Image (cartoon, rainbow, N blue to C red):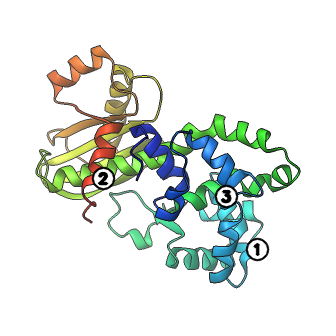
Amino acid sequence: MLPGYSAAAVVETLATLGGVPAYLRMLEQDRSIVDNLERLALDPNGVLHQEPVFLLREELHEPRSYFALLQAIAAGNTRLNEIAQAAGVERSPASRYLATLIDLGVVERTVPVTELHPEKSRKGMYIVADGFLRFWFRFVAPYGSLLATGQTQAVRDRLDSGLAGFVAPLFEQLSREWIVRAGSAGALPLTLRAVGRWWTRQAEIDVVALGEEGVLLGECKWSTRPVGRDVLNALRARGELFRGATGMGQDEPLRMALFSRSGFTPDLLAEATAESVLLVTAEDVVVASALTPPRP
């Protein structure tokens, strides 16, 4: 549906509007995604300006508390206590409200991929699962008074400066889906058991693929600069932390993958060839996403 967009623009669109065909049909593809978002969502007269309000009020009996929780998550709070405090909601009702939002598919609870009992894990983090709702609660809802008084440019400036950081988690998600597809197609040196994220207090790894033959770790960079050797070296260092934290033996294979919006430096390309490091571009990810759905 987006033939006029580059791979980067497609990812930005998915991150901010999600995959709803009705929203995508509203895009003017000769304009940037920020131009379109200003027209459709930031402008108080835009057709999507109040869309989440209408959608959620149809599903929820106490929308004010739910809205506060969603805005807290969209602002970067991921733990239950953080979310409840930021939203001004007691912990116990916040937990119930979040369970309802999870049932509706609005919020997702994630745990490190290595957790054996995810439902019991205390490491759970909450994210807004829907792209447009995440965008709206991050860039529209907090600035309602500014937008209502015609100060759209001030909000657009915040969107311009914060867009790359906002899009990065979606690129990480698409990269994990790329790994799932590649594994299903037999294009990886692993028979996949699970794919996800991993984190501790000391480190975070964007892509972790657990396989029968070892583990693949991946780093994702949504930057206008090509990825260089420093990123690979940093991933290797986190890989050693992963070994120690998970009890992985030194003799077990630990492979590396890098995902980049803007390609790779020549020295990294040379090292990746010699060390069998997997390099994946945004174009690779978008083309794969358009061809086949990921398998669970």
Q: Position of residue 30 (x, y in %)?
A: 52, 39
**Residue found at the very far top of the displayed protein:** 267
In terms of sequence position, does the residue under pointer 1 or pointer 2 come before the other? 1
In terms of sequence position, does the residue under pointer 3 or pointer 1 come before the other? 1
Q: Where is residue 166 in the image (x, y as percent from the top left)?
A: 56, 44
Residue in the image at 77% along x and 39% along y = 153
Q: Where is residue 265 in the image (x, y as percent from the top left)?
A: 33, 18
Tags 2 and 3 in contact by the CB under 8 Å rule?
no
Disc 3 to disc 1, C-alpha distance: 13 Å
Which is more foreground, mark 1 or mark 2? 2
**Res 137 label:** 3
Residue in the image at 15% along x and 21% along y = 274
Q: Name the residue under label 2.
A: 290
Q: Name the residue under label 1.
A: 64
Amino acid on which disc 1 is placed = Arg
Say whether residue 218 is left or right of residue 75.
left
Amino acid on which disc 2 is placed = Ala
Residue in the image at 45% along x and 60% along y = 19
Picture quadrant where residue 49 is located: bottom right
Tags 1 and 2 in contact by the CB under 8 Å rule?
no
Disc 2 to disc 3, C-alpha distance: 27 Å
Look at the numbered disc 3 and give the secondary structure of its residue.
Answer: helix
